[in-house]
Amino acid sequence: MNIDFTYSRAMRSADKLDRLAEQLSRVATGSLESCENNIRSNWESENSQMFCSKSQTLRDKITREASDVRKVASTIRKVATDMKNAEERARSLATVK
């Protein structure tokens, strides 16, 4: 298999994961936070506090998941780079002999 093709495909996959992580972060810090603020402003009851508490828990979980997705993307990049370098080194050693 072509090293550059495999490397490029891995990098594209990592980029997609980064975009997904960014979307998750926007949901957590944008949509859900805005929703909570609207609920706090317009719904005055014990249930609204419970809802916002659960929403905060969900936001925290989404934020952690986004961070984990970014870590996976970073690991993919590192492994792909290491593999590409190792294969190129092996190829250069094989042609020297």
Image: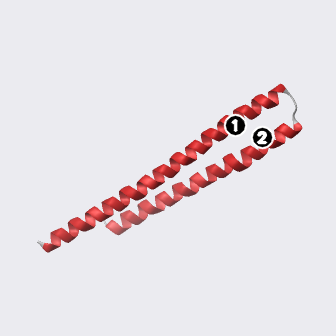
Residue 92 percent coordinates (x, y): 21, 71
Residue 72 percent coordinates (x, y): 46, 50
Residue that numbered label 2 is attached to: 36
Q: Image point 26% across, 64% down: which residue?
A: 87
Q: Image point 52% across, 54% down: which residue?
A: 17
Residue 81 percent coordinates (x, y): 36, 62
> Is residue 87 placed above or below 20 in the rendered structure?
below
Q: Image point 14% across, 73% down: which residue?
A: 96
> Is residue 45 placed above or below 55 in the rendered structure?
above
User: Which callout, 2 or 1, points at the residue further toward the start of the chain?
Assistant: 2
Residue 19: which quarter of the image? bottom right
Residue that numbered label 1 is attached to: 56
18 or 16: nearer the eye? Answer: 18
Q: Are marks 2 and 1 in contact (CB under 8 Å)?
A: yes
State left or right for residue 78 relative to residue 41.
left
Residue 86 percent coordinates (x, y): 27, 62
Image quadrant in which the C terminus is located: bottom left
81 or 9: nearer the eye? Answer: 81
Please tell me whether mark 2 sits on a helix, a strand or a loop. helix
The amino acid on which the numbered mark 1 sits, given as a three-letter code, is: Gln
The amino acid on which the numbered mark 2 sits, given as a three-letter code, is: Glu
